[in-house]
Structures are given as structure tokens and as C-alpha cells.
Image (cartoon, grey):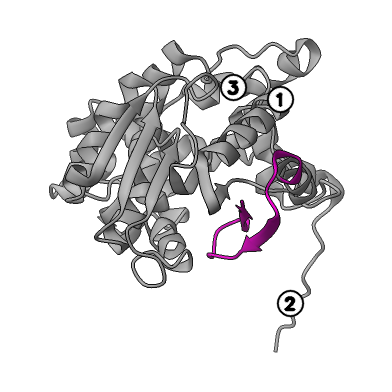
Amino acid sequence: MTVKVSKPVSSTQTLMQIHLCFAPARVLAAGIQLDVFSHIAAGRRTVAAVAKAAGATERGVRMLLDALTGMQLLKKQGRCYRLVPLSRQYLVPSHPDYCGAILGDDTLWRNWTSLADVIRTGRPPARVDMRNKAEEFFPTLVRSLHVMNRVLARRLARALGAGVRYKGLQVLDVACGSGVWGIAVAEADSQARVTAQDFPGLLALTRQYARRHGVEKRFDFLGGDLKKIDFGQDEFDVALLGNIVHSEGEVSARNLFRRLHEALKPGGRIVIIDMIPDDQRTAPPFALFFALNMLVNTSRGDTYTFREYAAWLTQAGFKRIQTMDIGSHSPIIIGTR
């Protein structure tokens, strides 16, 4: 009998593994950019067939397909490659659940290559928080995020009691993107009315998704910059902030909380969905990495701890601050007026 003794990974090997962590992301992006998932879905299952369809070299395609197989995004049988359920549903552009648009886009990659310079200077290479860049970049992003957040949004709607405990909710969806969070509330509460706010160039996309989900007639559309727009007073039961506070910076976020406190009815709730590190900023890694994502893509963005959110919401006038777990990377934060 042979006894195998596992060897601990050396410190230098650990560093090299960290160094190459970029590889899976680039492999996935290349697969999407070369449309290999569509080619395989269409029946082109050999290296030669995929290479011809993609206009690429057989040597490169063979390495790419093998790497995607190692990442469990493809299955290999002899010389043929097949899609696995994950890639068939989410990585083939013709599928309604396709979310490869952002995964194959190089915008974030290019900005992250400037990380050291941005840390030195504090100046990001591009600011997606500015209207012109936002209207250019976010349509690509939100098409993917809509699919990725759809299940979470429906869980949140149930947790908020939409359509069960509360009916006829007046909802404000701030910086709504595809409108996924507000759409879920409208689906759960057939009497709900949703005001979708975002830059005018993005609201056309919001309208498409609301129509697709059959709730467009119960949507109002409010175009403008969330930093300047008038949300009114005592108008809404719920204000949704779905993955937007991280791009705003502390000053803008605190101002937004004050204005939303005024816009909510007594007993109304502000709901914050975001990436939240622990109070010592030591975990979870995704929230910490996302802070750097804000450094290279915005002028003031960051991720914020529950302690910070609780303090800011209290100062804005919210009386009860609590968290809710909907199975995401971070808990949802709810403040009640």
C-alpha cells in the first residue's frame, strides 16, 4: 500500500497563487469575447470548429477550452466540449438569463490595472459616478446585475412583507438601474406603485425591464441626479438603495439619508443593499476588494460598516436600525422613520 503524504504549500507558492488569481477572470472574459459558449451551444464542439467560428487559432482555442473545462464551465469528452448547466443558462447570449455582458467587458479590468497609481494620486482613470460615464457604462453592468440580483430581490420583497403584511406600498427605487429591486416589490404587491429614479439615459432600460416583468403600468419614472433631485415629503412607504451608497461617498450618502427621511412617511423604511465589511474592516474579502473597486472607478466611493451606517441613519432621524439576512454576501440594513 502506498501512503501519500500531502505537502504544505510553501509561502512562495501561496504568493504565486495570489499573483495568478487574475487568470480565471481573464479566461472567462476571453471565452465570452470569442463567443465560445454560443459556438458550442450551436453544435461546434471541437477545437477546430470553435476556432473557425471564432476566427482564432486552434492552439489558443484548445488552451482556452481546456482552461474553461478546468474551471468547470465546460465538460470535455474525448475531443468534444459541451456546456454545463451554469454556462448554458448564464453565458449564452441568446438565453434570457444571460449575464455575461459585464463579465466580458474590460472596463473594470483596465481601471484596476491603474490601482497603484490611483492609490498614489487619488485620481481614478475614469469616473463611472459621473452622468456621461454612468450612462455609457451602467447599461452593460445592469443587464448582468438584473439576473444576478433577481432572486435576492424577490427574497427581499418577501422579507419586507410586500403583498402580505403590507399592500399598496408606495416605493422609491433610488438609482434603480434595471429596477430589479422595485420590480420584485411590484410583483409581490399587486397594488404597489414604484417610482424609479436614475439618470435619464438609464431609465429607458428600466422601462424595458418593468415591461418585461409586466409591471410597467405601475411604474413612474423620475430622471435626474440623486444628489440634486427633489424626492418630495411624506410620500413613500419604502425607499430602496440597491448597491448605490458605495459609489456616493460619506458626504453624499449622509445627505441622501436626510432627504430620504423627509421623503418617507412616518413609519416608512429605508432599505440599504450593499457590500458591508465588519466594523474592523478585516472581512469579508469581497467587501474589502469592492472598496478598492470604488477607488479606481469613483472620486469618493467606498464600502461602509454597519456601525457607520447606523450612526449616519440615526443622525438623519431614523429611529430603529436593524439588519436582515437574505442570503447575500452582506446583510440588508433597514432604518425606520
Given residues 72 and 160, the one toward you in this image is 160
Tell me the element at label 2: loop
Tag 3 or tag 1, which sits nearer the N-term? 1
Tell me the element at label 3: helix
Q: Quadrant of residue 60?
A: top left
Which residue in the rendered view is the most extreme toward the bottom? 1
- The magenta stretch is 314-337
* Residue appearing at x 65%, y 28% in the figure: 255
CB under 8 Å between discs 2 and 1: no
Tag 1 or tag 2, which sits nearer the N-term? 2
- The alpha-carbon separation of the residues under discs 1 and 3 comes to 18 Å
CB under 8 Å between discs 1 and 3: no
Q: Position of residue 309 (x, y in %)?
A: 72, 45
- Residue for badge 3: 297
Query: Which of the image's four quarters has the N terminus?
Result: bottom right
Judge whether 136 appears above or below 260 on screen.
above
In the rendered structure, does residue 30 fall within the stretch colored magenta?
A: no
Tell me the element at label 1: helix
- Residue for badge 1: 251
- The alpha-carbon separation of the residues under discs 2 and 3 comes to 48 Å
Q: Quadrant of residue 23?
A: top right
- Residue for badge 2: 4
Given residues 198 and 147, the one toward you in this image is 198
Q: Position of residue 53 (x, y in %)?
A: 17, 33
Judge whether 258 appears above or below 281 on screen.
above
Q: Amino acid at mark 3?
A: Asn
Given residues 17 and 223, the one toward you in this image is 223
